[in-house]
Image: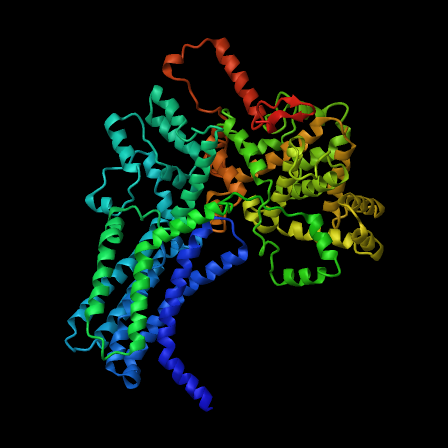
């Protein structure tokens, strides 16, 4: 009992000291690791950042509460004397600085921005507690320098704490939606108060130029990012701009979002916009350039810290505890460095991550494979452990960074083709599933040759499952069926050099096909809401369980475990399906049956025909682009906080290129959606001959059919798209 009593006494003496030092340590940890959120790091490391983020506020609030209780009941005076307790009160404003948080991690989740009112209430309550404890406990001993130092620190703490709810409110969804007023031309000249608390970007400069020259409203990069993140229909925006424009201005207004070229600089522009989107939502980028913020943090705050530390150093401290004096010096100096140079420290970490070549936001292509998962679950050594972890909510990507070396190949090709397509304005990407006749077909992914390949006299009867999987199945089920079939196909009939690393140029298209297939099923399993609204994650779980049950007998297990190649595994699965005589109406194995039947149809097509590889590739690109277009901007913005998805990169490109997104389909009527793109010619070109207009129309239709695969010439059985 004596030992427990001593521990209680020791904890009562050191409790507040440990809390304030722990709060300082968490703030330094956050300032060092927060910039890493802009990169793709392991999920376990992001969990550590999240724990530090939520714990930092809790520890600081607990420390303030402990400080208040100690001085409310007078226990500190009994143990250390009045001098020690008054010095502890000097830590209260420093804890307010800690509660203000770091510039690089104002919000961890997008929902945190909507809770800015809660943070405002916390601000008022904690400032009240700190001021009350200071007022009740500060002695009248004539130590004016120490009192003035405390007052300066309180000013600093209140300023810093106020910045957090301000930044959260500025990044809330309601504030982002308000940017639509820019399109209507309602932006007026800001008042002096608005100028002080509005960011200094090129927005007002652009609007001033527009007011003077009056050609059209010019949008800054932040404006465009805000519009897309707030699920604003860009087609509706263009219609609004068209109403304001006349003659030559209309073409410029229609292209206000579409100035994208397939150059490396424009791809860098897309990545920069994604970084801006992240900073807009999760950091203080939306307020850090405001004149009031700059004036406070560049001049007022450093001056207050210097004055406070100087006054404390020259004040009388002989009567105070030496330990408390040292802790006060540590808190004041390290908090001052943290608050004044935090942005610079974050920039240094950012540069370090660049030199370390960490993949940035959305620069990853995670892969997940259903058959490989089943094989891992069937292994006697690790299968039971994997099943136990899955049952308690463990996800396999928790300890994985989740990027693949093929990311740059897939990204360079797909994004370059999307950017180089000029006739995509108003294009419905869901038409990749359309398999109508030539006259009524508007399929953008499958050109006329590929449709003839599927629907021609020679192959029409042999490709019924392919047609059914594209045309009749729900999107999530179609993705899963095509994923299993693609994996079986590439396992049974891999092209020459398919498994070589680094990959050969001749098989990059096939490698990208498999990479997109694995990525789409990764979305279905881990981010079903991004794959498509209403996607059923249980389809993946059910297919995994059914395939495992199909192969659960001892003989099949031994064959799978002793299989020396993926080809042998695929043969066992197809043979097992055939031996079971699984009928399509059998609900238990219907999905596996459809996938095996689709794989058999693909393998039955001529191997030497390049159109087979082209068909599979274009189907997967069609699924990828359609999924990106149907995902809400809010979900893309939310996922940026977890490192982002490649799907968001594709979504940003197709949105700015003018393809129809979910917002466009919901906002615009069917009649408006069916209208041709509103890229009217300038008035001075309205006298173009009828024959030239007809030729232009045919060329536009040809460009749409070839999107996003223009200029794909054949070279020795493989397309030349990889030789750029």
Residue at the image point whose x is 27% and y is 26% from the top: 214
Can you give x and y, in whole percent of width and height, for residue 75 in the image?
Answer: 30, 83
Can you give x and y, in whole percent of width and height, for residue 65 in the image?
Answer: 34, 73
- Quick check: 611 above or below 498? above
Image quarter in which the C terminus is found? top right
Q: Is residue 532 visible?
A: no
Can you give x and y, in whole percent of width and height, for residue 617 in the image?
Answer: 65, 33
Q: Is residue 296 left or right of residue 140?
A: right
Can you give x and y, in whole percent of width and height, for residue 630 in the image?
Answer: 53, 40
Q: Is residue 505 left or right of residue 199?
A: right
Residue at the image point whose x is 68% and y is 60% from the top: 387
Q: Is residue 419 visible?
A: yes
Of residues 447 and 722, the one drawn nearer to the viewer in this rendering: 722
The image quadrant that residue 376 belongs to is bottom right
Residue at the image point whose x is 37% and y is 13% from the top: 684
Of residues 83 and 62, the one drawn nearer to the viewer in this rendering: 83
Of residues 68 and 353, the one drawn nearer to the viewer in this rendering: 353
């Amino acid at each position: 009992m004596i030992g427990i009593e001593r521990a209680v006494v020791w904890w009562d003496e050191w409790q507040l000291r440990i809390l304030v030092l722990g709060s300082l340590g968490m703030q330094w940890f956050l300032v060092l690791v927060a910039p890493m959120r802009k990169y793709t790091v392991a999920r376990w490391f992001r969990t550590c950042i999240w724990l530090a983020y939520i714990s930092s506020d809790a520890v600081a609030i607990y420390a303030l509460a402990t400080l208040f209780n100690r001085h409310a009941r007078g226990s500190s005076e009994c143990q250390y004397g009045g001098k020690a307790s008054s010095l502890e009160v000097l830590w209260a404003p420093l804890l307010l600085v800690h509660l203000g948080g770091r510039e690089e991690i104002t919000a961890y989740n997008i929902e945190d921005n909507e809770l800015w009112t809660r943070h405002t209430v916390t601000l008022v309550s904690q400032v009240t507690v700190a001021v009350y404890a200071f007022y009740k406990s500060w002695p009248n001993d004539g130590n004016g320098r120490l009192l003035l130092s405390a007052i300066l620190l309180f000013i600093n703490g209140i300023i810093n704490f106020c910045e957090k709810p301000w930044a959260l409110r500025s990044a809330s969804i309601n504030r982002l939606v308000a940017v639509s007023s820019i399109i209507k031309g309602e932006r007026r000249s800001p008042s002096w108060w608005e100028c002080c608390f509005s960011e200094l970007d090129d927005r007002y400069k652009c609007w001033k130029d527009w007011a003077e020259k009056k050609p059209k409203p010019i949008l800054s990069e932040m404006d465009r990012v805000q519009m897309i993140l707030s699920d604003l229909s860009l087609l509706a925006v263009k219609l609004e701009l068209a109403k304001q424009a006349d003659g030559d201005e209309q073409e410029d207004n229609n292209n206000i979002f579409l100035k994208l070229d397939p150059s490396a600089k424009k791809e860098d522009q897309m990545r920069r916009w994604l970084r801006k989107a992240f900073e807009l939502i999760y950091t203080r980028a939306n307020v850090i350039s405001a004149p009031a913020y700059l004036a406070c943090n560049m001049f007022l705050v450093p001056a207050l810290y210097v004055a406070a530390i100087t006054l404390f150093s020259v004040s009388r401290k002989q009567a105070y505890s030496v330990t408390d004096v040292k802790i006060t010096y540590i808190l004041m100096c390290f908090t001052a460095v943290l608050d004044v140079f935090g942005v610079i420290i974050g920039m240094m970490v950012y540069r370090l991550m660049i030199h370390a070549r960490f993949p940035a936001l959305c620069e990853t292509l995670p892969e997940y494979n259903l058959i490989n998962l089943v094989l891992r679950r069937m292994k006697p050594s690790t299968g039971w452990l994997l099943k136990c972890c899955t049952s308690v909510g463990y996800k396999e990507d928790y300890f994985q960074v989740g990027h693949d070396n093929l990311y740059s190949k897939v990204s360079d090709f797909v994004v370059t083709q999307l950017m180089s397509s000029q006739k995509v304005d108003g294009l419905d990407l869901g038409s990749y599933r359309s398999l109508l006749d030539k006259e009524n077909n508007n399929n953008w992914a499958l050109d006329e040759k590929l449709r003839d390949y599927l629907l021609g006299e020679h192959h029409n009867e042999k490709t019924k499952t392919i047609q059914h999987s594209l045309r009749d199945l729900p999107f999530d089920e179609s993705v899963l069926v095509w994923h299993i079939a693609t994996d079986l196909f590439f396992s049974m009939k891999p092209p020459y050099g398919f498994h070589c690393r680094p990959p050969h140029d001749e098989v990059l298209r096939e490698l990208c096909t498999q990479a997109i297939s694995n990525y789409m099923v990764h979305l279905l399993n881990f981010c079903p809401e991004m794959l498509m609204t209403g996607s059923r994650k249980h389809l993946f779980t059910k297919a995994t369980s059914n395939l495992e049950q199909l192969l659960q007998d001892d003989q099949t297990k031994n064959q799978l475990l002793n299989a020396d190649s993926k080809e042998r595994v695929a043969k066992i699965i197809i043979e097992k399906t055939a031996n079971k005589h699984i009928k399509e109406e059998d609900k238990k194995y219907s999905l596996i049956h459809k996938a095996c039947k689709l794989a058999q149809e693909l393998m039955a097509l001529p191997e030497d025909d390049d159109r087979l590889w082209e068909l599979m590739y274009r189907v997967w690109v069609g699924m990828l682009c359609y999924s990106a277009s149907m995902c809400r901007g809010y979900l893309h913005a939310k996922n940026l906080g977890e490192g982002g998805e490649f799907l968001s990169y594709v979504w940003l490109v197709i949105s700015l290129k003018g393809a129809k997104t979910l917002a466009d389909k919901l906002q615009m009527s069917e009649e408006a959606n069916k209208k041709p793109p509103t890229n009217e010619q300038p008035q001075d070109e309205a006298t173009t001959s009828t024959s030239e207009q007809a030729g232009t129309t045919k060329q536009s239709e040809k460009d749409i059919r070839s999107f996003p695969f223009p200029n794909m010439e054949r070279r020795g059985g493989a397309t030349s798209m990889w030789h750029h």
